[in-house]
């Protein structure tokens, strides 16, 4: 019951963020558009290998607001699972080629192990040209359960560890 309630809360927050993002088109319109990309992550702790590969797609409403969804595959120690993770992104610091952002959303995994996460991930992006951006996420603030919390049940807090570091790229159409 607790997981369902958290899932509904996250879905509601995501919908509210999406609606508010659609209402704000007062920024530079040249940065609107669909994009396709993804992220990869790898971690070795001396005993086991963990990795994630997650293709993503989304839409930039303007320079400040983006929505996206990641659908990926995770392998953490001996567990493998598939992930679905929609999010809304808010860019805070912008230059012509650099931005600092925070993604807010949730993730659900299922497979050998299950898990749920609801929270925020900070990151930065570097714009190479009109179509290509490289980005990275580091850290997490929020709630994690089961597989996302290394099989330790529910947990709330923040991390800034290298195991939360992911690199990616986007191609904007």
Image (spheres, rainbow, N blue to C red):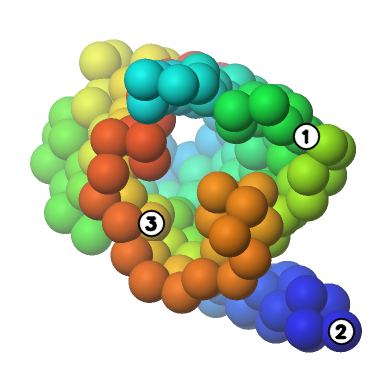
The residue that label 3 is drawn on is 140
- Percent from the top left, x then y, of residue 135? 33, 29
Q: CA distance from mark 1 to mark 3?
A: 19 Å
- Percent from the top left, x then y, of residue 140? 38, 56
- Looking at the image, residue 111 sits to the left or right of residue 31; the answer is right
Q: Quadrant of the N terminus?
A: bottom right
- Looking at the image, residue 111 sits to the left or right of residue 53; the answer is right
At mark 2, the secondary structure is loop
Could you tell me which residue is drawn at 38 percent across and 71 percent down? 157
Q: CA distance from mark 1 to mark 2?
A: 22 Å
The crowding category of the residue bearing disc 2, from other C-alpha atoms within 10 Å (few below 14, some 14 to 19, many at least 20), is few
- Percent from the top left, x then y, of residue 28? 32, 49
Residue 105, visible in the rendered structure: no
Q: Give the mark, 2 or 3, whose residue is nearer the N terminus.
A: 2
Residue 82 — which label? 1
The crowding category of the residue bearing disc 3, from other C-alpha atoms within 10 Å (few below 14, some 14 to 19, many at least 20), is many
Count of numbered marks: 3
Residue 5 — which label? none
- Looking at the image, residue 146 sits to the left or right of residue 67; the answer is right
Could you tell me which residue is drawn at 37 percent across and 26 percent down? 45
Name the quadrant containing residue 9.
Answer: bottom right
At mark 3, the secondary structure is strand
The residue that label 2 is drawn on is 1
- Percent from the top left, x then y, of residue 36? 59, 23
Q: CA distance from mark 2 to mark 3?
A: 24 Å
Q: Give the mark, 1 or 2, whose residue is nearer the N terminus.
A: 2
Q: Pick out the residue farthest to the left.
A: 95
The crowding category of the residue bearing disc 1, from other C-alpha atoms within 10 Å (few below 14, some 14 to 19, many at least 20), is some
Contact (Cβ within 8 Å) of mark 2 with mark 3? no
């Amino acid at each position: 019951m607790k997981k369902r309630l958290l899932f509904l809360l996250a879905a509601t927050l995501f919908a509210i963020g999406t609606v508010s993002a659609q209402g704000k088109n007062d920024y530079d319109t040249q940065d609107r558009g669909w994009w396709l990309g993804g992220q990869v992550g790898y971690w070795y702790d001396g005993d086991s290998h963990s990795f994630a590969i997650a293709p993503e797609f989304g839409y930039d409403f303007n320079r400040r607001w983006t929505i996206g969804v990641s659908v990926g595959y995770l392998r953490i120690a001996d567990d493998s699972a598939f992930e679905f993770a929609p999010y809304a992104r808010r860019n805070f610091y912008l230059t012509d080629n650099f931005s600092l952002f925070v993604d807010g959303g949730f993730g659900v995994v299922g497979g050998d192990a299950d898990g749920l996460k609801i929270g925020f991930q900070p990151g930065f992006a570097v714009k190479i040209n009109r179509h290509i951006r490289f980005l990275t996420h580091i850290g997490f603030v929020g709630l994690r359960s089961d597989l996302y919390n290394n099989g330790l049940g529910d947990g709330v807090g923040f991390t800034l560890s290298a195991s939360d570091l992911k690199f990616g790229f986007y191609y904007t159409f």
